[in-house]
Amino acid sequence: MERKTFTTMIDAPREKVWDTLWGDETYKKWTSAFAPGSRVETDWRQGSRTLFLDVNGDGMISEIAEKREPEFMSFRHLGEIINGKEDTESDKVKAWAGATEDYTLTEENGGTKVSVSMDIDGEYSDFFEKTWPRALEHLKNISEGNDIE
């Protein structure tokens, strides 16, 4: 497991970027870089169960480990859903369970610096190296009022 950080500068207030990150419709748009039809199911409270799902309902089981609106959100990944079945116990899942994904929003030069740091299993390193920059570009465009499509 390695820790990677992806960063972008956005010409928008921190509150606007926060709302773009976690709003139902805007979340679907910026995360389309990972998988078209991506969505999240949660009540957005610290300690709450969070499901990151693709169009087929497969994805990650996580929890909100820490939330300080509008500056920081941390997710702890606990398992996965494949073909409608939750897995938090297999050896495959236990190898990465507890990994975190942290979003830090910092006001800088009249805009917002977004840093995403996450623990990545080596098997997925190339995927995230390619998709995080694209996802952050989507986030930037949406937050700045530009269309991504």
Image (cartoon, grey):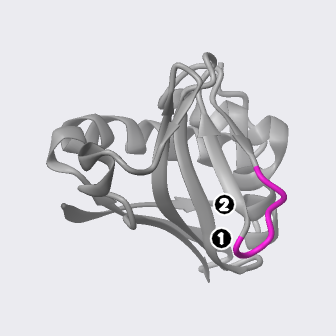
Magenta residue check for 133: no
In this picture, which residue range is highlighted in magenta?
42-47
Residue 132 image-quadrant placement: top left
Quadrant showing the C terminus: top right
**Amino acid bearing label 1:** Gly
Which residue is situated farthest in the left direction here?
122
Q: Are marks 2 and 1 in contact (CB under 8 Å)?
A: yes
Q: Which residue position holds label 2?
A: 11
Q: Is residue 37 above or below residue 128?
A: above
Name which of mark 2 and mark 1 comes first in the sequence: 2
Q: Secondary structure at mark 2?
A: loop
Amino acid type at circle 2 is: Asp
In the image, 149: left or right of 4?
A: right
Residue sitting at x 56%, y 48% = 61
x and y percentages locating residue 43 in the rendered image: 84, 58
Decide whether the magenta segment is chiefly helix, strand or loop: loop
User: Mark 1 sits on what residue?
Assistant: 111
In the image, residue 62 lies at what x, y percent? Answer: 56, 56
Q: Residue at x 73, y 71 (%)?
A: 14
Q: Is residue 136 above or below residue 98?
A: above
**How many other residues sit within 10 Å of disc 2, few (<14), some (14-19) or many (≥20)?**
some
Residue 19 in the figure: left or right of residue 49:
right
Numbered badge on residue 103: none
